[in-house]
Amino acid sequence: MSEELISLDLDDSGVGVDLPRPKNQKDQVQGVPYRPVEFRDDDLPAALERAAAWLRQAQEWLGEPIDVIAIHLDYDDTPSAPYYDVKLLCNEEDLAGAPLALREREQTPK
């Protein structure tokens, strides 16, 4: 059985270089195996709206729905920290752009 390698264009954290990043400076794509994408705010609806907007952009970039394994809601009651912490736990391969690379490879004439 032979294994074919797929070349992915990844940044230093292992996600696709063209993956839309959350626009607000409080939000981030974190660097752990299950890849939480974090949205922090004192206003829960605002954090959820940013999460939804990012998810739409990322799915448009990927060309298919992103596997969201779970949605985690937490809070941080330390002074001067945003209170709500919404995390979308996303499939690492989707954030790396693997489905894009597979489609491009399939469309390339041999």
Image: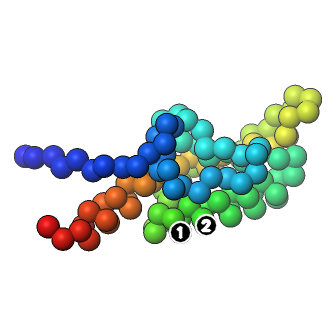
* Residue annotated with mark 1: 60
Q: Residues within 10 Å of mark 1 (few under 14, many from 20)?
A: some
Q: Is residue 7 above or below residue 83?
A: below
Assign the C terminus to one quadrant of the image. bottom left
Rounded to the nearest angstrom, the CA distance separating label 2 from label 1 is 6 Å
Q: Quadrant of residue 26?
A: top right
Helix, strand or loop at label 2? It is helix
The image shows residue 27 at horizontal and vertical percentages of: 72, 46
Colour pattern of the rendering = rainbow
Q: Is residue 50 above or below residue 26?
A: below
- Residue at 59%, 57% in the rendered image: 20
Are discs 2 and 1 less than 8 Å apart at CB? yes
Depth check: give the residue in front, 34 or 63: 63
* Residue annotated with mark 2: 56
The image shows residue 74 at horizontal and vertical percentages of: 74, 40
Residue type at mark 2 is: Arg
Residue closest to the far top: 78
Q: Is residue 61 visible to us here?
A: yes
Depth check: give the residue in front, 10 or 78: 10
